[in-house]
């Protein structure tokens, strides 16, 4: 998983509440188990019409936001089903941080496991960032995970809270597999001892 330290980029405003995971990545795109290729289907039903033509009014189709790295959204973002494809689609599009006043729990947890930083801020701070994000290509925001600080286009800063364990995982690019591999020497030592004390466990597999 790619490390998340400091992210600087255009923030796209999505001033909608209760954006569910089916809106983020519709069910017809869940057949793949690959994390790549889903960005083109992000918000499909809002980005395209029935013929596949772009909706020019949708925020991510507007020229200023086509390469947005940050999404500022309304409350209860990521509600609905537990599909992990939702953060995969955001990440594949290029969005590595979502800021909202609240998130659905499962989506919130899935973001951390996939290198996307979900930031919870008070509603008034989200409203300020939504206003900042309306500046188009000038809506450049910096998210500093180490300092736990957001810097807006005007230079003003907002502090945010994050669980220390999750912060450490993102800073060091550690997903669940990465965390396990940190203990690889202990795992190898355990298996070696077990081969000696309980060899029958490895006989059938030839291990």
Image (cartoon, rainbow, N blue to C red):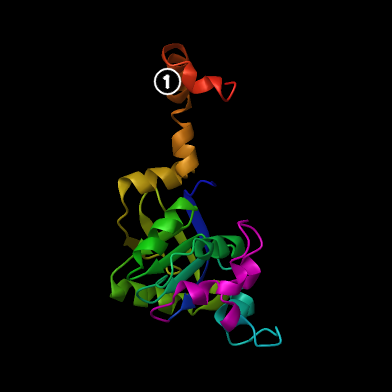
Q: Quadrant of residue 55?
A: bottom right
Q: Residues within 10 Å of mark 1 (few under 14, many from 20)?
A: few
Q: Position of residue 169 (x, y in %)?
A: 42, 44
- Name the residue rendered at 30%, 75% in the picture: 123
Residue bounds of the magenta highlight: 16-45
From the image, tell me which residue sits under label 1.
190
Residue, x 55% and y 60% (percent of image)? 88
Front one among 197 and 154: 197
Q: Is residue 95 visible?
A: no
The C terminus: image quadrant: top right
Per the image, is 44 magenta? yes
* Whether residue 127 can be seen here: yes
Q: Quadrant of residue 32?
A: bottom right
Image: 54 above or below 92: below
In the image, taking residue 30 as reference, residue 166 lies left or right, namely left
Up-down: is 194 above or below 10?
above
Give x and y (percent) for residue 16: 42, 81
173 or 108: nearer the viewer: 108
Q: Position of residue 12 (x, y in %)?
A: 51, 73
Q: For the residue labelled by badge 1, is the local secondary structure a helix, a strand or a loop?
A: helix
Picture quadrant of residue 54: bottom right
Q: Position of residue 127 (x, y in %)?
A: 35, 77
Give the prevailing secondary structure in the magenta stretch: loop
Please state the total of marks drawn on the protein image.
1
Q: In the displayed structure, does residue 106 sit left or right of residue 92?
A: left
Q: Residue at x 56, y 80 (%)?
A: 59
């Amino acid at each position: 998983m790619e490390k998340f330290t400091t992210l600087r980029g255009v923030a796209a405003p999505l001033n909608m509440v209760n954006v569910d995971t089916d809106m983020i990545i519709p069910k017809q795109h869940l057949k793949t188990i690959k994390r790549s290729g889903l960005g083109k289907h992000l918000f499909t039903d809002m980005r395209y019409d029935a013929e596949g033509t772009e909706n020019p009014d949708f925020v991510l189709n507007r020229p200023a936001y086509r390469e947005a790295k940050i999404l500022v959204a309304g409350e209860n973002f990521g509600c609905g089903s537990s599909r992990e494809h939702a953060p995969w689609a955001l990440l594949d599009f290029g969005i590595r941080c979502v800021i909202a006043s609240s998130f659905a729990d499962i989506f919130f947890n899935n973001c951390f496991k996939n290198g996307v930083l979900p930031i919870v801020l008070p509603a008034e701070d989200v409203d300020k960032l939504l206003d900042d994000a309306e500046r188009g290509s000038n809506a450049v925001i910096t998210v500093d995970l180490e300092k736990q600080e957001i810097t807006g286009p005007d230079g003003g800063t907002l502090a945010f809270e994050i669980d220390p364990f999750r912060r450490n995982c993102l800073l060091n690019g550690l997903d669940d597999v990465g965390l396990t591999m940190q203990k690889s020497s202990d795992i190898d030592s355990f298996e070696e001892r077990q081969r000696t004390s309980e060899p029958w466990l490895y006989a059938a597999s030839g291990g």
